Amino acid sequence: MLFTSIVYGPIHSRRLGVSLGINLMPTNAKLCTFDCVYCECGWNQPVSHPQLPTREQVRDALKAQLQNLNTPLNVITFSGNGEPTLHPNFLGIIQDTCELRDLYCPEAKISVLSNSTQLMREDVVEALRLCDNRILKLDSAIDDTMRLIDQPVNPNLSVEQIVERLQQFDGDFTLQTCFLRGEYQGQIIDNTTSEELQAWYQIIEVLHPKQVMIYVIDRTTPLQTLSKVPAEQMQQIAQPLRDKGIDVIVCA
């Protein structure tokens, strides 16, 4: 499922409420530094000259949508057909969005769903600091599992690198994890095992995010062998964090 416009919705997000989405990637292909086995946009496809919207096009499209909005918004969400922070003018676009939000719907939050791979860029970190909700992914605390689930374009990407970059926010972010089971090219996928969870809990202790968001697959995935983790087990995964006073959102 690809988003065919820069601005889409509003839609009802099971995680964020009434959301107006912004897609900074091409409208005809997914462009991402991950190739997650569960991504609703499908697998990455080779794109020789990807056409990204300009900063001006994003601003104009968002302004037009906000001017004609007939429903209250909870959030303006950067997501779309891949990793939004890949856009070279991401900082400027976030600055424009803050200005338009303040003018047309000051009660709405600005959220970014990111896979955390561009946090070595100072402009991306600066942009994320302007947002209300930095929702940053870590699908496993174990390298082999992270690479199996997320299929990073950089095969040497490690959990240690991601954690180090996340520490820049001093806990002022939401850590997002998708729990799932399945099989990929003869390898078992399961980030709900005792070993996986203990490593994940330890990372959360290190990062101490203000919120943890855990969820299960909800739409068609490119890998057909995946299965949902039962809702009851998702609550069990959340409980040790809640016992420590951490805010946990479960979408199951």
Image (cartoon, helix red, strand yellow):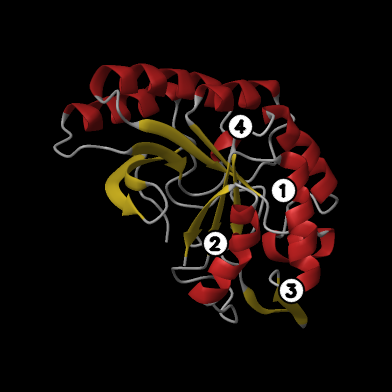
Q: Are marks 2 and 1 in contact (CB under 8 Å)?
A: no
Q: Name the residue under label 3.
A: 193
The kind of residue on which mark 3 rests is: Thr
- Give the x, y percent position of residue 96: 41, 19
Q: Name the residue under label 4.
A: 172
- Secondary-structure class at tag 1: helix
- Give the x, y percent position of residue 171: 66, 34
Horizontal arrangement in the rendering, residue 144 relative to residue 191 (left or right): right
CA–CA distance in space, label 4 to label 2: 26 Å
Q: Are marks 1 and 4 in contact (CB under 8 Å)?
A: no
Q: Considering depth in this image, is 127 or 175 the residue closer to the camera?
A: 175
CA–CA distance in space, label 2 to label 1: 24 Å
The kind of residue on which mark 2 rests is: Cys
Q: Name the residue under label 1.
A: 204
- The earlier-in-sequence mark between 1 and 3 is 3
CA–CA distance in space, label 3 to label 4: 28 Å
Please give the name of the residue rendered at 45% of the width and 68% of the height, measured from the top-left corner: 218
- The earlier-in-sequence mark between 3 and 4 is 4
- The earlier-in-sequence mark between 2 and 1 is 2
Q: Do the residues labelled 3 and 2 touch (CB within 8 Å)?
A: no
Q: Mark 2 points at which residue?
A: 39
- Judge whether 45 appears above or below 192 on screen: above
